[in-house]
Amino acid sequence: MNRVYLDYNATTPLRPEAKSAMVAAMEVTGNPSSVHAEGRKAKAIVETARRQVSDATGASGADIIFTSSATEAAALAMAGQGYLCAAVEHDCVTAWASEALHADKNGYVHAEDPKNTSLQQVNSETGVIHTLPEGIALSDVVQAFGKMPYAFSWSGAERAMISGHKFGAPKGVGALIIRKGIEVDARLKGGGQEMGRRSGTENVVGIAGMGAAAAAAARDVDAGLWGAVADTRDWLEGYLADAADDIQIFARDVDRLPNTSYFSVSGWKSETQVMQMDLAGFAVSAGSACSSGKVVGSKVLKAMGCDDDTASSAIRISMGLETTREEVERFADTWIEHYRRYKQRAA
């Protein structure tokens, strides 16, 4: 069976540029904090990657703090701050903020107090893109970077977080971007690495991969390669809608990531669909990878006003540049076949 991977918002394949950079970094022995030649060589790898991430994210005039993940970056940025957010945010944000803000039917959130608010650039389940207000305290750009034009310098945010494995870097490395003059309280203390903001010997190999992947991802966006993915996504949604008159495609008429489609047939449970598609050779998800394993309806959809049946019957398709139209057509035909069987059983 030739499997088809349609869960790029959960994680992406390792880019060849990242793999090459990581293999080269594995040959370097030194600790980046050591002053001898071996240590300076390791330090140079980290600083090269820092420049690559800064250039790729348009973060001129900002600091890049390497972390183990976006989750750690969120904790570093948010601990003790008392920020506000909406329930559509990722769990790593809602863990540190008060869910006091409201999301509309498309998942849009109005931030009345930007300097005390965390607002995502893109929602990981629906793909909905926010326009950030000037001075927003923190923005989760994990899904945005590498799939759409993005620059921290014009985003309006004071802090932003990214995760390497969402754009072709290895798992286990992320970063917090902060404007010059903005400070954070270190959560990990000890050796004073990362300008004293995140102690612990740097993950040189992972950071090298992240820098190379960031540069490659930015080039792909600049080249306009995601336009073809958007065309395939739009074809998929039209094809499914023609076959299933009771399908609900979320946020279909608003600005979304080019690769993301999130839809529901109320009553046909998400976990059932995910298992059926998996057995048929397709990797899809019920939403965020950090919460889709829980047998509950999507908290994002509930925050958008969906009822429990609809929220617990949604699946997400997220494509990459490697995804072909033929693969998506195969998925669509398979999903429609199972949909018709479901409708026959439910009749």
Image (cartoon, rainbow, N blue to C red):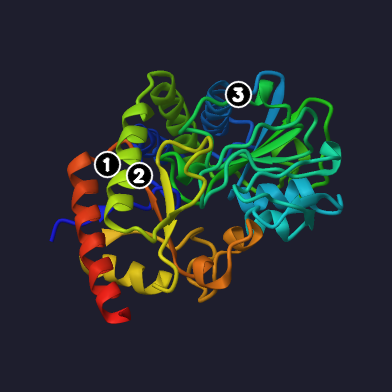
Q: Which mark is residue 151?
A: 3
Q: Mark 2 packing: few (<14 Cα in 10 Å), some, or many (20+)?
A: many
Residue 6: x and y in percent read 33, 51
Residue 67: x and y in percent read 62, 45
Apparent side of residue 346 relative to residue 123 in the rendered image (left or right): left
- Does the rendering let one see residue 166? yes
Q: SS of the residue at dot 3?
A: loop
**Of marks 3 and 2, the one in the foreground:** 2
Q: Are marks 2 and 1 in contact (CB under 8 Å)?
A: yes
Give the residue type that dot 1 points to. Answer: Thr
Q: CA distance from mark 3 to mark 2?
A: 23 Å
Q: CA distance from mark 1 to mark 3?
A: 26 Å
Q: Mark 3 packing: few (<14 Cα in 10 Å), some, or many (20+)?
A: some
Q: Which mark is residue 323?
A: 1
Disc on the earlier residue, 3 or 2? 3
Q: Which mark is residue 17?
A: none
Q: Quadrant of residue 18?
A: top left
Q: Is residue 72 above or below residue 297?
A: above
Q: Mark 1 packing: few (<14 Cα in 10 Å), some, or many (20+)?
A: some
Q: SS of the residue at dot 1?
A: loop
Q: Is residue 272 above or below residue 102?
A: below
Q: Which mark is residue 319?
A: 2
Q: SS of the residue at dot 2?
A: loop
Residue 91: x and y in percent read 64, 59
From the viewer's side, name the closer residue of 240 and 49.
240
